[in-house]
Amino acid sequence: MKVVSVVGARPQLVKLAPIAAAFAGTGYEHVIVHTGQHYDVNLSDVFFSGLGIPDPDVHLGIGSGSHGVQTGGVLAAIDPVLAEQQPDWVLVYGDTNSTLAGALSAVKQHLKVAHLEAGLRSFNRRMPEEHNRVLTDHAADLLLAPTEEALRHLANEGLAGRAVLSGDVMVDVCLRVRDAVLAGEHPRPTLPEGIDPEQPYLLATLHRPDNTDDPARLASIIAAMADLPVPVALLAHPRLKARAEAHGLKLDQGAVHTGQPLGYAGLVAAVLGSAGVVTDSGGLQKEAYLLGRACTTLRPETEWVETLAGDWNRLVPDPDALGRPAWIETATRPAPQSEQGTPYGDGRAAERVVRILAERLG
Ligand code: UD1
């Protein structure tokens, strides 16, 4: 069996790590195509080196652009690569523009497509990720759902026949790295200047267009973080930095201390060292949950609804609308004591994915 993985953005590199490791123990051929959607060292290279992922076999070097330019760029560049590789499966990950382009190129060439992290829905049609995941699910031949909820969404859209519950491969990598961090196998992460790792701090990230692109919205979120009574380590995604600069907005205000995005082990260590997480990232909501920290999500909805049970995650669409006392109570609340269960699987999803791909070929 020959499988081509198409990845391009940071969260996909995290999911690629356990998949590449699962392939390494088999006789199957695994080819990695990096679209180059993310190109900063901090968003791309550190994941390959830090998570021990083999270098990409093909790098398309697409980079940034409008949705059309980026998606179209990947589509045009990946066509000849897939035509030459002729894999048994094209494996696409998640919900990015690279995912949609990879899936589209493959189905047009009658190559079988498997979608990892299928069936997630925000039901928010403003999100580019929502268009990408719906279109990819409907194009793909095999839908690898991470949760029961995702499986239900696929069934509701008439896709049950192509769907299978695989569990979430992010659990595999998150728990493995957590254990290595706790065993002292990684150096301490570089937290933003002004953050004392020995004192309580909140870990924050912000990058969704709905939060960053409107100047008034971004200013109100940063002001709300600035008013928190605990220092906030804000790991600034390039999109956040670029938009803040364009809006003439200073990010380092009050409690907020900005720093660079971290590699994966650094991020896991930073979550473990934190008193809680404030974010609009899908991955970080789940990492906070798996690592036992309370999360406050700056969005009106989440795809990872399991994290909401037991108050592990709270949605805050607009901190200003909550009022400052309630916002401060929410963002600084301690981790709940409630049992979580294992809604995201047992940490062996990647092996299962490889097995399912092989079985479905037969
Ligand atoms: C993308 C994904 C999103 C995912 C996120 C993780 C889409 C539609 N969005 O969002 O689902 O959660 O990645 O990070 O695919 N930039 C750099 N250097 C880089 C990459 C981006 O400076 O290495 C800047 C560019 O100014 C670019 C902007 O960030 O225009 C946005 O990048 P893009 O890849 O379009 O989307 P993300 O916001 O990163």
Image: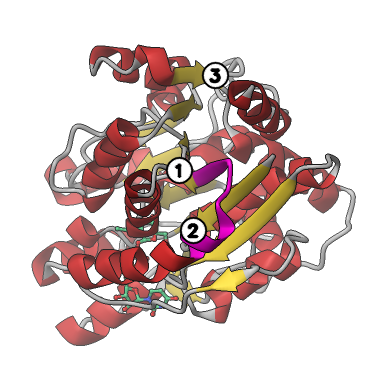
The disc, 3 or 2, on the residue closer to the chain's N-terminal end is: 2
Residue at the spot of label 1 = 111
Q: Tell me which corner region of the image, top left, top right, bottom left or bottom right, holds residue 192.
A: bottom right
Going 59% across and 22% down the picture, which residue do you hit?
360
Q: Is mark 2 within 8 Å of ligand 1?
A: no
The disc, 1 or 3, on the residue closer to the chain's N-terminal end is: 1
The quadrant of the image that shows the N terminus is top right
Q: Nearer the viewer, residue 210 or 38?
A: 38
The disc, 1 or 2, on the residue closer to the chain's N-terminal end is: 2
Q: Indicate whether residue 326 is drawn in magenta.
A: no
Name the spot of residue 273 as percent of width and height, x first.
67, 53
Q: Residues within 10 Å of mark 1 (few under 14, many from 20)?
A: many
Q: Residues within 10 Å of mark 3 (few under 14, many from 20)?
A: some
Residue at the spot of label 2 = 82
Residue interval drawn in magenta: 81-91
Going 19% across and 66% down the picture, which residue do you hit?
68
Label 1 is placed on what type of residue? Leu
